[in-house]
Image: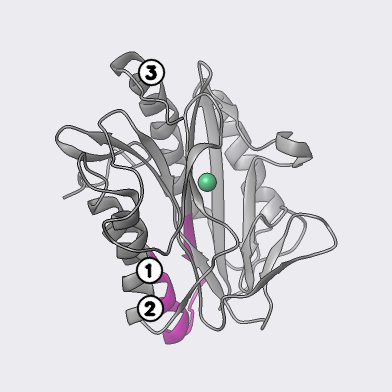
């Protein structure tokens, strides 16, 4: 059962999303060689609370922090720690917020100092794959249109889509139906309706698609040790097309 959100509910999700858009801009400015992922987590928690939200991940199934910070071969769900980022690393920062009981969820992968051409290309392609998926988030399309668009961009770039984790509906819970795989067939799956809200989130690996979860029970890494990128936006399906709820208001509107 995919719950449709009305305009009052969407407004709450916009509020949660706006916090995340601003926060990710701010975190991007803080990411630099020498900073710890724990310091980024503290900035995130303080900002979300100052803005009147609550961190959505902290305590979720026992997750201990406000952000997930996933470095290099870590795909998703990395736990912030005293690890210092160093030049040449890439770091995926994933964060959720709750406002008046409504959730938003967003992620970006940032370069730490100067990074390799290989890493820059992976990041750019992963973001392009997300945007290709978002463009399909309009009433009358099918879920498989989103999935396929993401997969096509990633695989044309020569990369592997992670299949063990998928995007999701979002609303009064962090994860609601439907699942939003980052691979699939166009023209398949349920028909999108205005009022759906989806967290669309490709995870793209430089090497193979296989991932494994470390003994901490959270951190998912690429099995072959090669780098991975992750981008996520919370997107409402509206009669006018996709509306990104987690964009930074200072950035140009989505075309
Ligand atoms: Mg998510």
Disc 2 to disc 3: CB gap under 8 Å: no
Q: How far apart are marks 1 and 2 (CA)?
A: 6 Å
Q: What element carries label 2?
A: helix
Disc 2 CB within 8 Å of nearest ligand 1 atom: no
Disc 1 CB within 8 Å of nearest ligand 1 atom: no
Disc 1 to disc 2: CB gap under 8 Å: yes
Tell which tag, 2 or 3, sits nearer the viewer: 2
Q: What element carries label 3?
A: helix
Image point 69% across, 63% down: which residue?
A: 220
Q: Distance between the residues labelled 3 and 1?
A: 31 Å
Residue 145 on the magenta span: no
Q: What stretch is highlighted in magenta?
A: 108-126
Residue 9 image label:
3
- First along the sequence among labels 3 and 1: 3
Number of numbered callouts drawn: 3
Residue 5 found in image quarter: top left
From the image, tell me which residue sits under label 1: 151
Residue 65 found in image quarter: top right
Residue 155 image label:
2
Image location of residue 109, percent across then percent down: 48, 62
Instruction: Determine if residue 192 is in view.
Output: yes
Instruction: Determine if residue 124 is in view.
Output: no
Image point 28% across, 48% down: which residue?
A: 142
Image point 51% across, 81% down: which residue?
A: 206
- First along the sequence among labels 2 and 3: 3
Image location of residue 172, percent across then percent down: 52, 23
């Amino acid at each position: 059962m995919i719950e449709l959100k009305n305009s009052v509910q969407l407004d709450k999700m916009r509020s949660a999303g706006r916090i995340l858009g601003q926060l990710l801009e701010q975190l991007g400015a803080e990411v630099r060689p020498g900073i710890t992922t724990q310091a980024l987590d503290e900035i995130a928690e303080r900002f979300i609370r100052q803005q009147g939200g609550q961190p959505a991940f902290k305590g979720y199934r026992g997750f201990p922090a406000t952000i997930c910070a996933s470095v290099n071969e870590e795909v998703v769900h990395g736990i912030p720690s005293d690890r210092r980022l160093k030049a040449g690393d890439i770091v995926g920062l994933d964060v959720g917020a709750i406002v008046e009981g409504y959730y938003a969820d967003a992620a970006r992968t940032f370069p730490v100092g100067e990074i390799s051409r290989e890493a820059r290309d992976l990041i750019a392609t992963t973001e392009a794959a997300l945007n290709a998926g978002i463009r399909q988030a309009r009433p009358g399309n099918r879920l498989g249109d989103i999935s396929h668009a993401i997969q096509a961009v990633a695989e044309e770039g020569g990369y592997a889509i992670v299949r063990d984790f998928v995007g999701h509906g979002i609303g009064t819970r962090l994860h609601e139906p439907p699942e939003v795989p980052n691979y699939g067939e166009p023209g398949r799956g349920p028909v999108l309706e205005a009022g759906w809200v989806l967290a669309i989130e490709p995870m793209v690996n430089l090497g193979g698609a296989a991932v494994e979860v470390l003994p901490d029970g959270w951190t998912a890494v690429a099995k072959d040790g090669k780098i991975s990128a992750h981008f996520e936006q919370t997107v409402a399906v509206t009669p006018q097309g996709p509306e990104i709820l987690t964009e930074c208001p200072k950035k140009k509107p989505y075309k």
